[in-house]
């Protein structure tokens, strides 16, 4: 017996010696590399996912109140530093309007839904209690656009972290610097307060390859994309659960009962916001014949600048270009006008206008490429229609079945109802600018990831969670008399075998 004990002691001593000497045992039990202190800034996708995974494990140990503290730091920075960060984004991306860059960050900081959206459902009945809770997916891979680089990250981070997740972001290359700076500030504040780093990770040199690596990475459990058709298709083909905010071409219908002056103000407010970069923004307007000319006059009074037929033709030639070849050839907005001020658009056809003008407009027919193309610049085509039925039909056709956003100006409830049913869009706005659908001048909550192709709509923390059900049988029902659960045999389950017949 003593010999056996001595042998065991010798073996243990040898193992400890090897561990201390850096032998094979040391390699097997080496502590995982920590990425604390990086503040979410990475060049390598593998490292970013590893850091986000480490952060997720740390976050999973914390309370809902800790999640709120984390989110409060993101909110505070977005609000208090909106001028500095919005200006930096404008200087880097050079698209949109500065006041709207600032406003987007401040508004998202205030209005993006957080932990207050997290809720559980309870079913209580004769056979006990079932509780449905919402659990995180883990690390979420995100693609963000140049149009709202840091705002999209801000909104996604609030919702995703509220749901208990962490995220790895591949920003658009045109907005990579402001994305990295915003993420660094968020993480630094969170780390100094709660000791958790890299809840949001960003790739500082984003490419198509880094995006594909995120899509395919085993450590990424879910994908959230805000972008154009190509990246949306890639996300849907990733083999992972995907929340996709795809393209839009939102139409507006104005019928004969509309308050035309109000409609004009709303169209200008929505279509000119951030120079028409919003995917929900008014892109083309279909007006019934009987009020068409009056509607154009209302646009004049509201401060938009009307182009005549010759100017519309000239502008179309310079502002819309074709890409691709053969059957893949299609029209797209010219990059030099994308998200630029109305004065810049006007100079493209040799016209000098006041920098205070926010929107250009003009009459076209439906063959003008500005009608089918998501132009993302502050020019809106107006198309005459015989009646409201034709206007709704054209609106449906040129929305392309994206089921994204549609707008109507009308005081006829039946026309509103008819258009709502026909369009079947995620967002449907009546008598307001497009932003009202996100709670900006209307009711509801805010998000810049509006998942239309995959159907989640305006995203919330619950969008980025999965359901878990916990059932307690025959107990904790304190109302009424409990009914014992029937024998399993009555449900087609063998008590002895434990499987369904």
Image (cartoon, grey):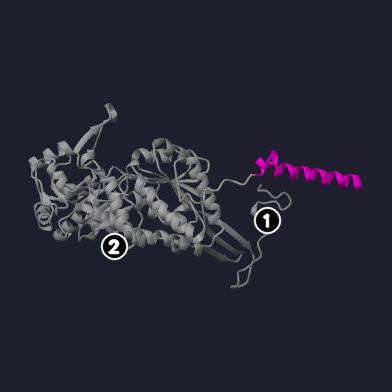
In the image shown, does 257 or 351 lie closer to the viewer? 351
Task: Tell me the crowding category of disc 1: few under 14, some 14 to 19, or many 20 or more residues within 10 angstroms, Cα based.
Answer: few
In the image, which disc is placed on residue 442? 2
Number of numbered markers: 2
Residue span colored magenta: 1-29
Q: Mark 1 — residue?
A: 488
Q: Is residue 107 above or below residue 501?
A: below
Residue farthest top in this picture: 326
Is residue 354 on the magenta stretch?
no
- Residue 1 located left or right of residue 295: right
Name the mark on residue 352.
none
The one nearer the camera, 235 or 395, is 235
Q: Position of residue 485 (x, y in %)?
A: 65, 62
Q: Is residue 414 left or right of residue 301?
A: right
Quadrant hosting residue 491: bottom right
Tell me the residue at 47%/46% (across/down): 222
Query: Looking at this rendering, what residue extends furthest in the front direction?
Result: 21
**50 or 84: nearer the viewer:** 84
Residue found 56% across the figure and 52% down from its top = 57
Q: Main secondary structure of the magenta part?
A: helix
Q: Earlier in the sequence, mark 2 or mark 1?
A: 2
Q: Is residue 188 visible?
A: yes
Q: Is residue 27 magenta?
A: yes
Query: Percent position (x, y) of residue 52?
Result: 50, 48
């Amino acid at each position: 017996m003593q010999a056996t004990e001595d042998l065991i002691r010798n073996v243990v001593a040898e193992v400890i010696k090897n561990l201390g000497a850096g032998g094979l045992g040391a390699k097997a039990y080496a502590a995982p590399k920590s990425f604390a202190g990086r503040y979410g800034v990475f060049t390598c996708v593998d490292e970013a996912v590893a850091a986000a995974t480490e952060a997720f494990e740390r976050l999973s140990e914390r309370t809902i109140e800790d999640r709120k503290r984390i989110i409060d730091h993101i909110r505070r920075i977005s609000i208090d530093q909106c001028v500095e960060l919005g200006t930096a984004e404008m200087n880097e991306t050079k698209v949109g309007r500065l006041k709207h860059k600032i406003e987007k960050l401040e508004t998202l900081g205030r209005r993006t839904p957080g932990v207050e959206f997290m809720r559980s459902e309870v079913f209580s009945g004769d056979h006990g209690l079932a509780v449905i809770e919402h659990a995180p997916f883990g690390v979420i891979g995100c693609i963000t656009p140049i149009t709202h680089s840091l705002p999209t990250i801000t909104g996604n981070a609030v919702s995703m972290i509220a749901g208990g997740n962490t995220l790895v972001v591949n920003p658009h290359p045109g907005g990579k610097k402001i994305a990295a700076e915003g993420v660094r500030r968020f993480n630094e504040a969170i780390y100094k307060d709660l000791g958790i780093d890299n809840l949001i990770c960003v790739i500082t040199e984003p490419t198509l390859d880094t995006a594909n690596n995120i899509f395919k990475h085993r450590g990424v459990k879910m994908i959230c994309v805000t972008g154009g058709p190509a990246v949306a298709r890639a996300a849907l083909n990733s083999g992972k659960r995907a929340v996709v905010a795809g393209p839009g071409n939102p139409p507006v219908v104005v019928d004969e009962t509309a308050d035309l002056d109000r409609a004009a103000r709303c169209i200008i407010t929505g279509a000119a916001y951030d120079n028409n970069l919003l995917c929900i923004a008014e892109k083309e307007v279909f007006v019934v014949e009987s009020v068409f000319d009056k509607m154009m006059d209302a646009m004049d009074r509201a401060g938009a600048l009307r182009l005549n037929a010759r100017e519309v033709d000239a502008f179309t030639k310079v502002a819309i270009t074709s890409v691709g070849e053969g059957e893949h050839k299609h029209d797209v907005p010219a990059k030099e006008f994308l998200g630029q001020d109305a004065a810049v658009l006007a100079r493209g056809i040799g016209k000098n206008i006041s920098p205070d003008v926010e929107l250009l407009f003009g009459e076209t027919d439906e063959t003008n490429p500005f009608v089918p193309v998501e132009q993302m610049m502050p020019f809106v085509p107006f198309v005459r229609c015989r009646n409201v039925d034709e206007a709704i039909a054209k609106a449906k056709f040129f929305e392309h079945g994206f089921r994204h956003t549609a707008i109507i100006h009308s005081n006829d409830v039946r026309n509103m109802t008819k258009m709502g049913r026909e369009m079947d869009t995620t967002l449907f706005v009546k008598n307001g600018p497009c932003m009202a659908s996100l709670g900006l001048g209307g009711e509801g909550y805010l998000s810049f990831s509006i998942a239309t192709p995959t159907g989640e709509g305006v995203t919330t923390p619950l969008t980025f969670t999965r359901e878990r059900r916990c059932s307690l049988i025959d107990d904790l029902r304190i109302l009424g008399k409990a009914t014992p659960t029937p024998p399993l045999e009555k449900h087609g389950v063998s008590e002895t075998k434990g499987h369904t017949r």
